[in-house]
Amino acid sequence: MLNTRKTTSWLLATAGATALMAHGAWAQAAGEPVPELDVVYYASDMGPEFEQSARALADDWSKLGISLQLIPVQFSTFVSQFIVGGQLEDIGVFTVGADPDRVDPTYWVYDIASCGQRRNGSKWCDEEYTALATAQRSLINPEERLEAVHRLQEMFVEEMPFWPAINRTYGILYNSEKWEGIESPEPVAAHEALVRPWLTATPLTDDRWLDWAYFEDVSTYNPLAEEGAVGWLRYIYDTFAKNTSGGETVPWAAASWEWVDDRTVEMTLRDDMTFHDGKPVTADDAVFTIQKIVEWQPPAMSSRIGNLAGAEKVDGNTFRFLLKEPDAAFETTVLTYLFILPEHIWVDAPENAVDWDVVADDVVIGSGPFKFKTWRVNEVHELEAFPDHFNAPKYDGLRRLALGQADAIRAAMLDGAGDIATTVLPVASMDDLARQNDFLSFLEVPSHSTMFVWLNNEKAPFDDVAFRKALRMASNKQRVVVEGCQGFGTVAGEGQVPIALGRWYNSDLEQIAFDVEGARKILEEAGYSWNDQGELLMPSN
């Protein structure tokens, strides 16, 4: 009962239908077959493993008597439509990346699972859960917060609104005849916001530009609006702190900070920092940025800035963050995300600053280790090294080749056009290429990146917890590891928090074994049945 449709034009064609279904206009009558369900997943611009994974999962789900339509969706469209756009029709199979700030549990228990949150694409809403998820953010006592996070995982599993399938193992393939110092950022992916490997790389030849064979995920160089390539822009616009590969949060543009009280953080910037146009970076710029972000409330930043009340200057290099409520995750999730804008440029921003085309107006100016040079859409991005930065790269520039397909990235790594590859090309292929070619080396990077199965909780049959639990029991996670990722991944634990987060993961959760017959029994006990054609019928009682 599987179909595959190789187009995304359906998004526009069914826009009106989506609105109807959201209001229950197409609810199935009792005893009628469960309608064909769409399974959307990342298209090949993110690598072939997503179709392989979606196909493996759907093959087992179809054994419940469900008809499924497989639909690939390009990455940036998937993010805007489903992850933050709230337009998931039925089922989504996709991965959330191993971003550095996600070593804190807030992203997992609050951002993607609480009522009304922008990243809650499954549209699940449980008021009791949301109250506790919100409260845990303010629990400064680490043991109290740990207890709350563990309880949230228990509540989540009881309802099973969506679930993790696997935790991804990333890879780094690089040309070791041209580059050294390429270091693993484990357990975080080779995210652009990190020091490793981008600022530890050292050239071995006269070619001093590092060519990254990648794909196009940048929609704008306006940091108020970009959602898919946040880390890339944070190399232009410095953040106050960075997450190290081990998960520790360390000062970056900030020299230091201290908590004055549980709602006030006093921060001192590094001395002698300058923007790319030579103007000094001061506390005035930081205060201006924070005050404007609070005023503008950019939707793309909503999950991080909701608790910011503002900022106030102390002296030339010192200022204070003012919070509405205590925030236990502030250092990890906010300081590593917020950037510094140059006041002398952004004071003249248009009224709707979120829509400002900063490339067209030639104002892509930050204070980061790289400065903007070129963007040719779906072709190349070039960032020049900024030698005056306190942690300047040891080479002349970073070039992102927007190749978009695994075959193109493979060819680039073999013919020397690419120096490093970190995604799209399957990890198993990276390993094979390094084994077969002496000039290529491979690093395996286990991570907390998670492939999720999301469901539209506002719509039948997904609004029935019995159906959700049956679909979860019929999800063969080990098959996804083997068939989807060729063994480069690990079976995810139950709940929404990755095992890689250590003590934050609730190890007392009972693991659910793959069992199609058990899933059919859950459905039968909930009133579902099957017709002579084996189709699953909605409950008749």
Image (cartoon, rainbow, N blue to C red):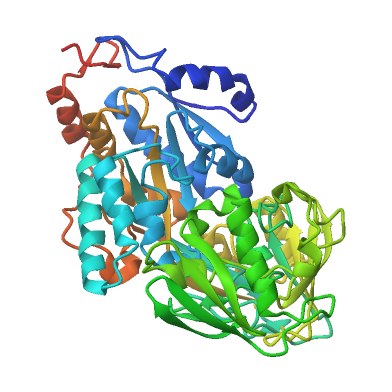
Q: Nearer the viewer, residue 149 or 215?
A: 149
Q: Residue at x 62, y 20 (%)?
A: 13
Residue 79 rendering spot, x and y as whole percentages: 56, 44
| Residue 276 quadrant | bottom right
Q: Is residue 197 left or right of residue 493?
A: right
For residue 315, say whether it is visible. yes
Residue farthest to the right, as pictured? 361
Q: Residue at x 29, y 12 (%)?
A: 533
| Residue 61 quadrant | top left
Rendered view: 339 above or below 73: below
Residue 241 rendering spot, x and y as whole percentages: 55, 77
Quarter in which the N terminus is drawn? top left
Q: Is residue 64 left or right of residue 57?
A: left
Q: Residue at x 44, y 22 (%)?
A: 22
Q: Nearer the viewer, residue 180 or 508?
A: 508
Marker count (numbered): 0
Rendered view: 36 above or below 349: above
Residue farthest to the bottom, as pictured? 271
Q: Nearer the viewer, residue 131 or 514?
A: 131
Residue farthest to the left, as pictured? 525
Residue 242 rendering spot, x and y as whole percentages: 54, 76
Q: Nearer the viewer, residue 271 or 252?
A: 271
Q: Is residue 161 left or right of residue 97?
A: left
Quarter in which the C terminus is drawn? top left
Residue 174 rendering spot, x and y as whole percentages: 65, 73
Q: Residue at x 73, y 86 (%)?
A: 394
Q: Is residue 39 left or right of residue 424?
A: left
For residue 97, say whether it is visible. no
| Residue 166 quadrant | bottom left
Rendered view: 47 above or below 459: below
